[in-house]
Image (cartoon, coloured by chain):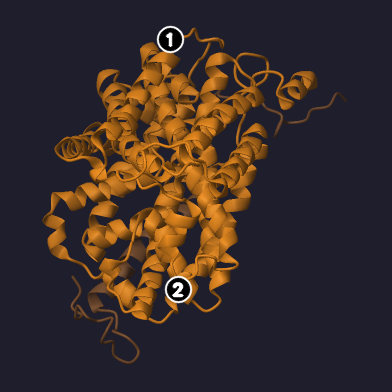
Chain colours: A brown, B orange
Amino acid sequence: MADVPADRYLYRPEGGWPMSTEAILMMAVAMVIIWGGLIASIMALRARPDRTDLPPGGEDDHREDAGIIEHDT
Amino acid sequence: MTRFDSTAIDAEAVGLVSTDNTTTAPREQFTGQVGFILSAIGSAVGLGNIWRFPGVAYENGGGAFMVPYLVALLTAGIPILFLDYALGHRLRGGAPQAFRRVKKWLESLGWFQVMICVLIAVYYAAVVSWAASFFVYSFGLEWGDDPAGFFFGEHLQVADVGGADAWLTFDFVAAVLIPLVLVWLVAIAVLAAGVVKGVQRANVIFIPLLIVSFGALVVRALFLDGAVDGLNLLFTPDWGALSDPDVWIAAYGQIFFSLSIAFGIMITYASYRRRRSNMTGPGLVVAFSNSGFELLAGLGVFAAIGFLAMESGTAVADLPIAGVGLAFVTFPAIVSQMPAGAFFGALFFGSLVMAGFTSLISILQVVSAALQEKFALSRRAATLGLGIVLGLISVLGFSTTTGLILLDTADAFVNNIGIVASAIFMCVFVIWIYRRGPELRYHLNSVSTLPVGRWWYVCVGAIVPVMLIVMLTGFIAARIAEPYEGYDTTYLLFAGWGSVALLVIGAIVLTLPRWRSREEFTPWPTYPPTDTSTARKGAGR
């Protein structure tokens, strides 16, 4: 797979074998697509967290954790 | 002006009445987008992200593996995640409830998924407990110069199965049993506290902590001597691998097993979102977070392995690079040779505990939700019941000297047959037979900011089932041709195939009793849409 010798761990040059160009390229591509995709999806969600044109209805009951507290006035 | 019924709420809060639609108490809900996303990430990011992805990528083409991996993410991972979300969010229930609302008899598929969670939970808790023990051992580097001997011999005291000992023993190991009981107690406490005060709160605390601690570990690993050698091995592409069908199957398998899809978790979590909630936008964040964490794990694990290979003068191929061996043998060896090893050992095993625990509670929530909904149980009654029963099974099966063998066998069969079959059934019945694809797509598009195109039908109706059928038949054929890991065939019949049989039997038995909660339910938004403007916004896009 790699173009470094099979016994690279036994006969290692000072400072170690450099990372191959192909490996650097594939690492960069993976990072850009996956972490870039994550950042893009977070930014898109922050820009538009929810639909503002939802169909009518679909109101939930509230529960004990985050119910809207309404008081008689 | 209306006044909220505080009596009903208080009764529900202390667990006296059901949390679902059987009483006046409404369904539990995540408080918002962040809580839901962190909980879903907590479920998806688990032990497999840390110990499975790096090894799978290395063995299947290195850098070239990223091509099938990304294709699998886009054509299988995200589409099935959206299918789970659509089912849970539209049909407002855990797996049995949601499938029952597709077709009454399909409740059994929901219970099949619940049974998968039951079986996974009992052994997954054991692995979390090992990680917790090793977190403590890290401070004194207790494994010394022989991590393998320490893990298999001193900690687990693995029996000599196939030799002097039986394949299944009830010789309990205190060092495994005590942490395992503690894991169950904490998990029960979290579930009993509810979706917001328990599940969401645990994830809001643990997920940021996991990212920071694991991130720090990865950064340190990247600066170790020899780290570049490890990264070279992981990312140097073998383009020839792309023509190997097994590499593509491995990529689909990795995406499929790591996203916590198709066995009820994402259906259950989505059912706890408010109806008027964005689903696909957060879904994309969850999917990319899961893959992002896997990539981070790949960098950290291979940088550390490169360091160990250099320090010990061995080839990477001779080291355990995946699974239990990577976590509990290779990593302790790495930690022993690292500067400030005790600290980084604690970071690694602490990360494993957090990743595992947040996944464990999501698995158990599937079981709890199903029991609450079908049998009209309160949250606390369901949690306590499942905690005692599953905790006992977990302790009996996995804190003994044969626990590791049973875990390995059950894990292989439940994942490769149970989850894969569950996903195939889901696609075939929901999409093909009962034709609910357009309705579910309409639902997602009505509430979400990211529109789902017609490509989704191709993914969940064709690509996913075909790939999974290939995976399933391949695994079954391999198991028929040769015993799993060379284990005893009688043992495999009970522990392996028996686990699969248990999934089916459990699904049938749990479907039979009368459904005790109320049946009235109206999906929202109405489908097919009556209003033309609504129709334009939905499926028409």
Q: Which disc is residue B221 wearing?
A: 2
List x then y, in percent, for residue B32: 60, 40
The answer to whether residue B210 is above or below residue B332 is: above
Q: Amino acid at mark 2?
A: Ala
* Quadrant housing residue B422: top left
Disc 2 from disc 1: Cα separation: 53 Å
The answer to whether residue B73 is above or below residue B330 is: above
Q: Which residue is located at x 53 percent, y 37 percent?
A: B395
Viewer-side residue, B278 vs B225: B225
Q: Is residue A1 in sight in this rendering?
A: yes
How many marks do you count on the picture? 2
Q: Amino acid at mark 1?
A: Leu
In the image, is B338 to the left or to the right of A62?
left
Residue hosting label 1: B512
Q: Chain of mark 1?
A: B
List x then y, in percent, for residue B3: 79, 21
* Quadrant housing residue B95: top left
Q: Secondary structure at mark 1?
A: loop
Viewer-side residue, A45 vs B343: B343
List x then y, in percent, for residue B367: 51, 28
In the image, is B278 to the left or to the right of B532?
right
Viewer-side residue, B456 vs B535: B456
Q: Which residue is located at x 40 percent, y 50 percent?
A: B48
